[in-house]
Image (cartoon, rainbow, N blue to C red):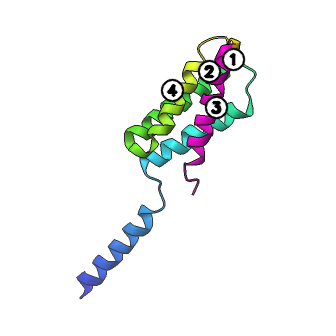
Amino acid sequence: MRRIVGLVCLVAVAAACGGAHPKPGLKHARAACAHWTKINAGIADVAQRQAESTQFTTEATAAAAADVRYNNLKQAAESWQLVQTGPLAITDVSGFQEAITAARTACAGVPTK
């Protein structure tokens, strides 16, 4: 009987602790979106913006590798990286807007809690 009670307690503790930590995919997705929030707020310094963009892509790629649900986040980050490669011409504005929309949409789908 003590063994059964001990086992039930162990299972209860494991279940409680398991819910406290997000899964790796979610953890990386949240980190990616935190970087996106900084980028989206506007960063004047080009080097800092590129560093945040790189971290956004790194975390989004890790999220997608851990959980296929975050492939759209990875694709959005890759699109964002592409538009960051050089000065924009007027014809590039739609691609820039699409990258921003994709990143915003992907991050909107990441649970915050």
From this view, report whether residue 99 is shown above or below residue 31: above
**Relative to the observer, which residue lies in front, 26 or 103?**
103
**Residue 15 place in picture, x, y as percent:** 39, 68
Q: Residue at x 51, y 38 (%)?
A: 73
Q: Give the residue pinned by disc 2.
A: 50
Secondary element type, mark 2: helix
The number of numbered discs placed on residues in the rendered structure image is: 4
Residue that label 3 marks: 100
Q: Quadrant of residue 35?
A: top right
Whether tag 1 and tag 2 are in contact, CB under 8 A, the answer is: yes
Does the segment drawn in magenta span residue 97? yes
Please state if 106 lies on the left or on the right of 13 as rendered: right
The span from disc 1 to disc 2 (Cα, nearest Å) is 6 Å
Relative to 27, is 71 above or below? above
The residue under label 1 is 46
The CA distance from mark 3 to mark 2 is 15 Å
Q: Give the mark, 1 or 3, whose residue is nearer the N terminus.
A: 1
Residues rendered magenta in the picture: 91-113
Q: Which mark is residue 103?
A: none
Q: Residue at x 26, y 85 (%)?
A: 2
- Do the residues under discs 1 and 4 have CB atoms within 8 angstroms? no
Dot 4 corresponds to which residue?
A: 78
The stretch drawn in magenta includes residue 29 = no
Q: Which is in the foreground here, disc 1 or disc 3?
A: 3
